[in-house]
Amino acid sequence: MTEDALLQLLHRGKHLATSIIASAETKLAWVGVYPLDVHRKGTVRALQRSGLSMPDNDDIIYAVRAFEVERTRVNSDAWICEDDLDNKVNTVVIGDDALRAKLEEVGVRMDQLDLPYKSNYPI
């Protein structure tokens, strides 16, 4: 999918994900991108925890989440919950450029993102 198409999905509130290289053979890893609703109280709290303030323009606020899960847990087709996630990195960024930069930090190009089911995103 092109970057423009992916950004359109994100701007419409769809979340996207991709698998990434895990830290060990026994684990699987992903990164997920979640557009946040500026009208929800949780978004304000997420911004505050990240040391950010509400943007005064139309920039989209994104939660970027990278994590790993034990391969055996995923392969057992079990329900994955928060306690199953290892090496979690949760970040909030504002705007498409900041999203690109954050994805680059975890070794992901924007065009690698797709709908979550296409990468077996477990959460």
Image (cartoon, grey):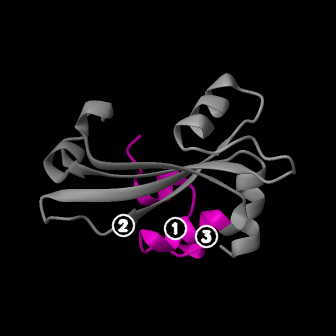
Q: What is the spatial separation of the Cα atoms under label 3 and label 2, in whole angstroms?
A: 15 Å
Residue 79 position within the rendered picture, expressed as x and y whole percent measured from the top left: 30, 32
Residue 57 position within the rendered picture, expressed as x and y whole percent measured from the top left: 87, 51
Q: Residue at x 65, y 33 (%)?
A: 43
Q: Which residue is denoted by mark 2 in the rendering?
A: 20
Q: Residue at x 75, y 51 (%)?
A: 60
Q: Residue at x 30, y 69 (%)?
A: 21
Instruction: Using the rendered image of the protein, determine whether residue 81 is visible from the camera's viewpoint.
Output: no
Name the residue at the top extreme: 41
Q: In the picture provided, is 36 more to the left or to the right than 117?
A: right
Local packing at callout 1 (Cα closer than 10 Å; few below 14, some 14-19, many 20+) is many
Looking at the image, tell me whether mark 3 or mark 2 is earlier in sequence order.
Answer: 2
Residue nearest the observer in this picture, 13 or 117: 13
Query: What amino acid type should be assigned to the residue bearing mark 1?
Result: Leu
Instruction: Using the rendered image of the protein, determine whether residue 26 is visible from the camera's viewpoint.
Output: yes
Give yes or no for contact between labels 3 and 1 (Cβ–Cβ under 8 Å).
yes
The secondary structure type at the circle numbered 3 is helix
Residue 108 magenta: yes
Residue 61 position within the rendered picture, expressed as x and y whole percent measured from the top left: 69, 48
* Quadrant in the picture for residue 10: bottom right
Residue 88 magenta: no
Q: Which residue is denoted by mark 1 in the rendering?
A: 103
Q: What is the spatial separation of the Cα atoms under label 3 and label 1, in whole angstroms?
A: 5 Å
Q: Which residue is denoted by mark 3 in the rendering?
A: 100
Looking at the image, tell me whether mark 2 or mark 1 is earlier in sequence order.
Answer: 2
Q: Which residues are magenta?
A: 98-123
Give yes or no for contact between labels 2 and 1 (Cβ–Cβ under 8 Å).
no
